[in-house]
Image (cartoon, rainbow, N blue to C red):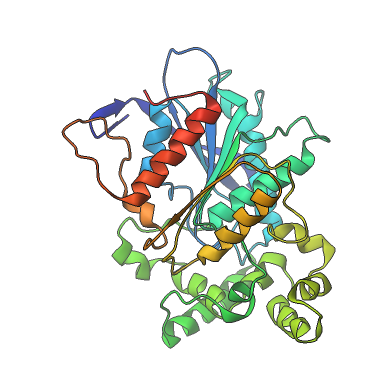
Amino acid sequence: MAEFGSTSVNHVKKTLPIKKIQGKDLLVDAYFVNSDIPGPRPVILFFHGGFLISGDSNAVPNWLIKAALRRRWTLVSANYRTLPESSGFEVAEDLLDAFRYVARSGDGGLSHDLNKPGLVDPSRIIIAGHSGGGYSAVLATIEIVKRISASPEFRKPAATVAVYPMLDLLSPKWTSEGIDLGASRADIEAGRKDLERRLASKEISFGERFPDNEADIIYHGRWDLMRYIVKIPLFVNYLTGISDLGKKLASAALTSPSYEAAKEETVPPKARHLFVLDFDNLTSDFPPLFVVHGLADTAVPFEDSDKLVEKTKTLGIPTRYWRLEGFDHDFDLGYPDLENADPEVPETGDIGQKALRELLQGLDGLLGTSKA
């Protein structure tokens, strides 16, 4: 049970296993309202951020939890295997299994495990994520849409929400320039040693919870590892399991007639689905898309979102995009609530809050819902 601002929302949070991998449970957190209101409800399937390297299902923003509960939506925050112990192939598998679990009505599905028959409306599932989870949301949607005609387990999501998503993973920023998250030489060396240790252990990881206090991030167990992989950069190597893919792409770009040709030459067909903005992975069957990105993002280039939106609009996909001047990565994690019903609490001029309220209103319009 929880109280949010002046709006009291009685709800339950349950942590549930969806499958076992190497003897370990892969878990999701489900937030739902105990209500006598009949009928199935929309669901937000949320994927956490952390560059696909760290974070866990606890990294879901408070404002989104509260907005979902006010609308009597169920929110499911899913874990997935993380790099470098696993590859993007395993990440994609876990994303699809999370969707199957949420959408399935019978044994082995969310409604069954919560003992809430008919809780989920499979035609009103929103796939959402932040940062690396934004990539996960887009990748999951593409992979689901591919499978609709072949499998009754999959239905087209009602919408996809990507907040400061990392997407253009074959761009030079991700493959050769690297992203600096403030790591010193000592931090980089610590990350290198941690990488070697983790790969030698041959154990899988489902990420690690981020500290509640931002100042404590330096004590986070995967912080140096994450900074090392994106700085060097080694990200696409571990995403695909292809050694030195980034270097091979940079080398091919020197002799190929274009950078696009270098991508075709370098990335094998089996790995191309992992690069959501390339190789015609996006199609006109993609559902309505909502994108938010700060133009002062120091962790994920806002150009990643620009490129996504350019492609979706060309394909005729309904798209709304908020480009926020002066906003950095994780800007929304400080928002406890966007819809405080207390009339004594004044509205702010924060354009980030305004954008997210508009996003929620857009979802209400699609789903035919409103906040309680």
Residue 94 in view = no
Which residue occupies 50% across, 78% down? 191
In the rendered image, which quarter contains the N terminus?
top left
Residue 324 vs residue 61, the one in the foreground:
324
Tell me if residue 248 comes above or below residue 315 in the rendering: below
Left of 264 or right of it: where is 175? left
Residue that protrudes farthest toward the left in the picture: 344
Residue 38 vs residue 365, the one in the foreground:
365
Q: Residue 111: image x %, image y %?
A: 57, 25
Tell me if residue 324 comes above or below residue 113 in the rendering: below
Tell me if residue 76 comes above or below residue 219 in the rendering: above
Tell me if residue 219 comes above or below residue 293 in the rendering: below
Which residue occupies 46% across, 40% down? 359
Q: Quadrant of residue 230?
A: bottom right
Which residue occupies 19% across, 37% down? 345
Residue 190 vs residue 158, the one in the foreground:
158
Q: Residue 240: image x %, image y %?
A: 71, 66
In the rendered image, which quarter contains the C terminus?
top left
Q: Residue 334: image x %, image y %?
A: 31, 52
Which residue occupies 58% across, 18% down? 118
Left of 257 or right of it: where is 213? left
Residue 251 in view = yes
Number of numbered discs visible in the structure rendering: 0
Q: Residue 353: image x %, image y %?
A: 35, 46
Residue 224 vs residue 299, the one in the foreground:
299
